[in-house]
Image: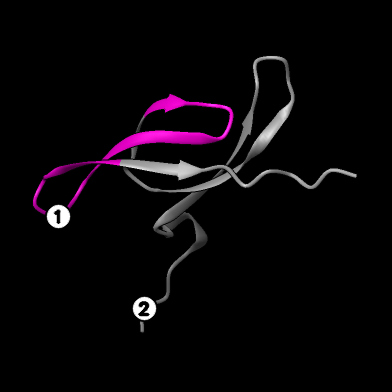
Amino acid sequence: MTDRRPSEADDLEWTVISAEGALLGIVRIPRGLTITDIAADAILGVARDELGVERVRLYTLSKPATN
């Protein structure tokens, strides 16, 4: 077992906010993901595996609860 600091975690949690300042949602993405597009409900990016092969990844936003 290895001890890891939170800053060394594999995933990052992002809070996504619209240009108008509205909270769109929260998403966890892996370190090293190159973000290519942010939409109202998802983040699209490119990640490289350990062999350097690029793969397109889509991550869905977790929407905040509404009252």
Is residue 34 found left or right of 39 in the rendered image?
left
Q: Amino acid at mark 1?
A: Glu
Is residue 42 found left or right of 52 in the rendered image?
right
Query: Which residue sits at x=39%, y=34%?
Result: 44
Give percent across and percent down for residue 57: 33, 42
Q: Give the position of the C terminus as an image quadrant.
A: top right
Query: For mark 1, what is the residue?
Result: 50
Camera-nearest label, 2 or 1: 1
Q: Which residues are magenta?
A: 36-56
Q: Tag 1, which secondary structure? A: loop
Chief SS of the magenta region = strand
When the figure is inspected, residue 30 is found, relative to residue 14, above or below; the finding is below
Q: Quadrant of residue 3?
A: bottom left
Q: Tag 2, which secondary structure? A: loop
Q: Amino acid at mark 2?
A: Thr
Query: For mark 2, what is the residue?
Result: 2
For marks 2 and 1, the one nearer the N-term is 2
